Amino acid sequence: MKMLVVGVGGITNGGKSTLSQSLHQQIPNSCIIAQDSYFKEDSVVPVDNSGFKQYDMLDALHMDTMMSHVDSWRSNPDSFLRERGLNTEPAAEPDSEEVFVLIVEGFLIFNHRTLNELFDQRYFLEIPYDVCKTRRGSRVYRPPDPPGYFDGHVWPMYLKNKLEMLNVASGIIYLDGLKPKEELLAAVRENVFQEVDRLRGRLQ
């Protein structure tokens, strides 16, 4: 049994979830752990001097719980998939090993040092300020973004977190989130399958 951990990070509304879901659908023995599933309750998220909830930081997330789920997958990916009702598929060739792929998706996955060290491949989606603001404004959040939240918190924190990420992570492949979804998927999928084949011993 061999394992591959793929990180899909990037800016809010940059296409992380779409790319991750598409990869999962095309990669056998894969699953997704999404960072957005680990936000703390709204009542415990701190507020800055402008009255904005500080969601765009690691302290707003139950990272200990997320790491425990990642570690559970790493200890036995086959069992992890079965417990979640996901089918596992045997290796394509009788003499090759199964390769299990974990896709970790989120906006701060490369800022968490312990998590970042686990990635075999790192992808980071970027889109321009104006596109990001438009996309963010078209989505419904619970709780909803207050007026001025994007410019007062989301975008400044994105820039801050990206700078901090560069001090933690290396080997990141940057992706243009404005490109067609199919093009982005094809590029990442090819890289992932090349590594899967290498792990199976089909590539030297």
Image: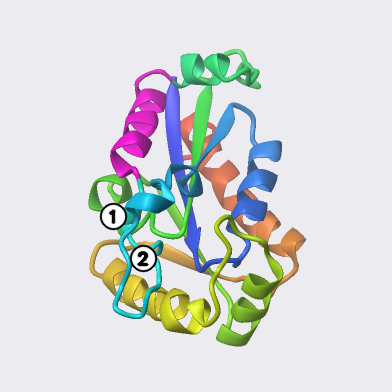
Contact flag, marks 1 and 2 (Cβ < 8 Å): yes
The quadrant of the picture occupied by the N terminus is top left
Magenta run includes residue 68:
yes
Amino acid tagged 2: Gln
- Numbered range of the magenta stretch: 62-76
Q: Main secondary structure of the magenta part?
A: helix
Circle 1 residues within 10 Å: few <14, some 14–19, many ≥20? few
Amino acid tagged 1: Asp
Badge number at residue 54: 2
Q: Earlier in the sequence, mark 1 or mark 2?
A: 2
Q: Secondary structure at mark 2?
A: loop
Residue to which mark 1 is pinned: 59
Q: What residue lies at 70% left-to-right and 38% top-to-bottom?
A: 25
As drawn, 83 above or below 137: above
Please state if 120 lies on the left or on the right of 130 as rendered: left
Q: What residue lies at 31% left-to-right and 76% top-to-bottom?
A: 163
Circle 2 residues within 10 Å: few <14, some 14–19, many ≥20? some
Q: Secondary structure at mark 1?
A: helix
User: Residue 84's image quarter?
Assistant: top right
**Disc count in the image?**
2
Q: What residue lies at 55% left-to-right and 46% top-to-bottom?
A: 192
Q: Nearer the viewer, mark 1 or mark 2?
A: 2
Viewer-closest of 159 and 54: 54
